[in-house]
Amino acid sequence: MPEIRFKQTILECIMATEQDKLLEEVTNREYQYGFHTDIEMDMLPKGLDEEVIKEISRRKKEPEFMLEFRLEAYRNWLKMESPDWAHLKIPPIDFQDMIYYAAPKKKPQLESMDEVDPELRATFDKLGIPLDEQKVLAGVAVDAIIDSVSVKTTFRETLAEKGIIFCSISEAIQEYPDLVKKHLGSVVPPGDNFFAALNSAVFSDGSFVFIPKGVRCPMELSSYFRINAMNTGQFERTLIVAEDDSYVSYLEGCTAPMRDENQLHAAVVEIVALDRAEVKYSTVQNWYPGDKNGKGGIFNFVTKRGICKGDYSKISWTQVETGSAITWKYPSCVLMGDHTVGEFYSVALTNNYQQADTGTKMIHLGKNTRSLIVSKGISAGFSQNSYRGLVKVSKRAENARNFSQCDSLLLGDKCGAHTFPYLEINNNSAKVEHEATTSKIGEDQIFYCNQRGIDTENAVGLIVNGYVKEVINQLPMEFAVEAQKLLQISLEGSVG
Amino acid sequence: MLKIKDLHAKIDGKEILRGINLEVKAGEIHAIMGPNGSGKSTLAAVLTGNEAFEVNEGEVEFNGEDLLDMAPEDRAREGLFLSFQYPVEIPGVSMTNFMRTALNEQKKHKGEEPLSASDFLKLMRDRKKLVDIDSDLTNRSVNEGFSGGEKKKNEIFQMAMLDPKLAILDETDSGLDIDALRIVANGVNKLKRSDNATILITHYQRLLDYIEPDYVHVLYKGRIVKSAGKELARELEEKGYDWIKKEFEE
Ligand SMILES: Nc1ncnc2c1ncn2[C@@H]1O[C@H](COP(=O)(O)OP(=O)(O)OP(=O)(O)O)[C@@H](O)[C@H]1O
Ligand SMILES: [Mg+2]
């Protein structure tokens, strides 16, 4: 894809902290009047017990099975303990000091792009975010200039014609309760782990995707098209179901810096792929990482799991992670059907005092199952970046194959990179290969670039983008270009 | 073009360059020879702005500007080029992308528009012919897995792409087979004009058979201890450095 390489542009320097300040200002400019009463009406007091959960379910007008789902999860959660953090240093979280239900906050509506902070716009431009999307992010009324509402309508119509469902999970619970009941919790059961249990008990909203038999979704499904998905709060829930012979590529997140007052984020994503179905899930995560000294920042504890239920199905996860103070995330594939394929492509970048513990789990259950893991860690500043991967081959999984490539790139000598591959092989026919490398951006490499007229900032960008190419190439084109720029911006000021 | 006055530089407190004086004018080719460890590569590193070395005395003027005051990338953009004695590998970064970035930085510095993709590719094709470098090499990552000779050829290819005012070639001839040596030398000769200049760092006469220097200098213990015309190189080839060392120690 030479086009992508050519699109790389030269970025001027805006320090990350300045960006954050700007965003804070913009996002804090709440509507001054009338908002208060909204809050009073649509918010539950702090704390969590069965009454709070019943109230959440009642306010969301959910069917009975959902309340039971939530309560079961809550009872499980009570019996669980917060996981052992291994390489993460996590301050204790007081779960009774949080609010578990608040109506989505409305951002102030601005009349046009002219009202948006020029420096915030500059950041958007640097990231190459399309104008339409910029407006959504900055809270500009979109129908005024370009009629993106009609774009969205056309988009919905096209999907509806094919029988594809793409809506919020709350809407799905109301409209398609049977589908939701059948699949919700089938991949990540309500008692799966501490944070998944908490999410199951209190989740506020998220996305639902259903691709019927034999349908190839004609476009990338991006949560951007559902504006309200942007404000789903701290416990997001996503469910994707691909029936026999279907295909979908789903994009989550965005490269613009995301700020949120909620420090804890615990999302759950479930994917079900039936016979010969293929699901591609791509995500770029850029939550607020905290300041240069490690203050503030979001804790991101995510459970993402897909099940290749039908024979010959395939699930592939691609992620680019640059955000959060603490990230704990292991997108996994359960290869249940025969001849199924699981893939994991990941770039995790940590800078300053960020901590990331990410990786994947590939569980081989069916015969002739294959998995591929490509993990690229980049650590700068004082950050700690760990890869943790499990490859498990069950007794009946004849001829399972796995290849793992785990690379770490260090910028400077105050950061750390750690690789923890775990293998559980219970079938002798399995072939499992693991390769790992650790490298440093050398001063000699940077000087070589300098000598050709490329400054240090751009030299680092060039070298880093070369290093992550294999993963970036998995992303849809537009996303790939944004992701490359994001990596470069995230490293500004970290070298030289 | 280049005026070096009493240049001293050190690394880890050890003085390597101990008072270099040299003037290079447009249209000239200078050869710098000298025993191993005498400071030839150090001179190249200091001129191109490698921060590992500390300049503790002296001045360098490049096209009327204070060279030592410029960032390394600005020196390059102003037309100073170094063909490295040991070119570095940059995995994953394609030669195409690398060269395009470098060239556009230079254009931006001069206030010119960046090259379009098609003009750039045309230039690549043209310059590849000039130094007879394999397309296979320019399709790969920068120097990654290149043989020693291929790396040297690639340096000259980059020089041809960037069209510098002053090129320093640090032992570009070492590691080249006979054909490659001729090709590289031809490339350098073809790029030579009355408005650019070249400094050749070499140990051997054979490169100077192809590229005729106007001056030959001997660097010894951080100083230029002898300068003369091209006949000096032949003399060194015959007699070695002992007589110069002796002369110098006296
Ligand atoms: N990074 C360094 N740290 C310590 N000493 C150094 C360093 N780089 C160079 N030197 C020393 O400086 C002196 C000059 O080295 P330089 O590489 O300039 O020699 P040279 O003339 O290019 O030799 P050659 O002909 O072998 O290439 C040597 O004694 C070398 O050991
Ligand atoms: Mg040398």
Image (spheres, coloured by chain):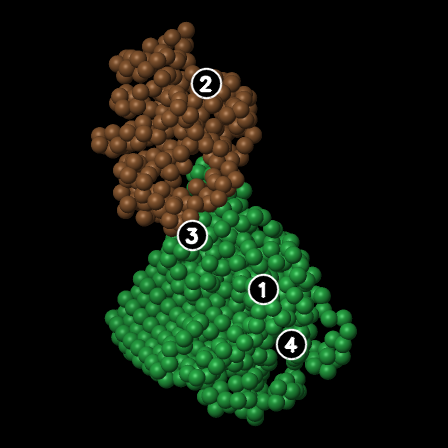
Same-chain check, marks 4 and 2: no
Q: Which chain is green?
A: A
Same-chain check, marks 3 and 4: yes
Depth check: B34 or A404 in front?
A: B34
Dot 3: element: helix
At 61% across and 72% down in the image, what residue appears?
A: A143
Q: Which amino acid does label 4 sit on?
A: Pro
Read off the residue under disc 1.
A134
Q: The brown chain is which one?
A: B
Q: Does the residue labelled 3 lie within 8 Å of ligand 2?
A: no
Displayed quadrant of residue B232? top left
Depth check: A2 or A72 in front?
A: A2
At 41% across and 10% down in the image, what residue appears?
A: B249
Q: How far apart are marks 2 and 3 (CA)?
A: 41 Å
Q: Residue reaching furthest top?
A: B250
The spot of residue A363 in percent (x, y) is 37, 73
Read off the residue under disc 4.
A104
Read off the residue under disc 3.
A6
The spot of residue B69 in percent (x, y) is 56, 30
Q: Distance between the residues labelled 1 and 2?
A: 57 Å
At 47% across and 23% down in the image, what residue appears?
A: B1
Note whether B99 is above or below A207 in the view shown.
above
Question: Residue under mark 1: which chain is it in?
Answer: A
The spot of residue B54 in percent (x, y) is 53, 28
